[in-house]
Image (tube, helix red, strand yellow):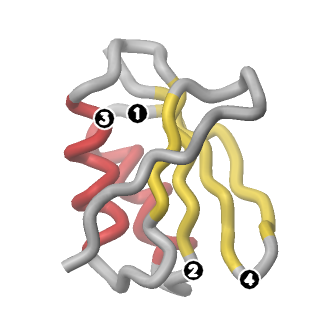
Amino acid sequence: MRDIRLIPQVMSDFDATLDAIGLLCPLPVLKARKRLQALGPGDVLQILADDPAALIDIPHFCVEAGHAFLDQSEGENHQIYRIRKGG
C-alpha cells in the first residue's frame, strides 16, 4: 500500500497536496477524505491522480461530503483536482 506523500507547495492557491498517482478507485477518494480531516474549513486540497475513474469519483465525493469541487486540470500523465473543504 502506498502512503500519502505531501508535495512542497509552489503555488499559493492550495493548502495541501495529496499524491494519489498510481492508486485506483476507490483509494484516491478514501485518501482525500482522510487528508481533509487534518485541514480546516475553507482549506484547499490539491489531488494528483491518474485513475480514469477519479474524473467521476472526486466531484461526486465533493457533492456527497459537502466540499466544493473547484476545478480539474491536466498535468503530465495525470489530472490535478482542487477541492475546498466544507465547513
Q: CA distance from mark 4 to mark 2?
A: 7 Å
8 is higher (above) or lower (below) than 40: below
Single out the mark in the foreground, 1 or 3.
Answer: 3
Locate the N terminus and report the quarter of the image it occupies.
bottom left
Q: Nearer the viewer, residue 30 or 64?
A: 30
Q: Nearer the viewer, residue 5 or 79?
A: 5
Q: Which residue is mark 1?
A: 67
Q: CA distance from mark 1 to mark 4?
A: 26 Å
Q: CA distance from mark 1 to mark 3?
A: 10 Å
For the point 54% across and 70% down, the residue is 49
Point out the tag, 1 or 2, that comes first from the N-terminus. 2
- The crowding category of the residue bearing disc 3, from other C-alpha atoms within 10 Å (few below 14, some 14 to 19, many at least 20), is many
22 is higher (above) or lower (below) than 15: below
Q: Nearer the viewer, residue 85 or 76?
A: 76
Point out the tag, 3 or 4, that comes first from the N-terminus. 3
Tell me: 80 left or right of 20.
Answer: right
Secondary-structure class at tag 1:
loop
Amino acid type, mark 2: Asp
Q: CA distance from mark 1 to mark 2?
A: 21 Å
Q: Which residue is mark 2?
A: 50
Point out the tag, 4 or 2, that comes first from the N-terminus. 2
Tell me: 16 left or right of 35.
Answer: right
Point out the tag, 3 or 2, that comes first from the N-terminus. 3
Q: Which residue is mark 4?
A: 77
- The crowding category of the residue bearing disc 1, from other C-alpha atoms within 10 Å (few below 14, some 14 to 19, many at least 20), is many
Tell me: 16 left or right of 63.
Answer: right
Q: Are marks 1 and 3 in contact (CB under 8 Å)?
A: yes
For the point 64% across and 38% down, the residue is 70
Q: Which residue is mark 3?
A: 36
Q: Which quadrant would residue 66 be assigned to in this image?
A: top left
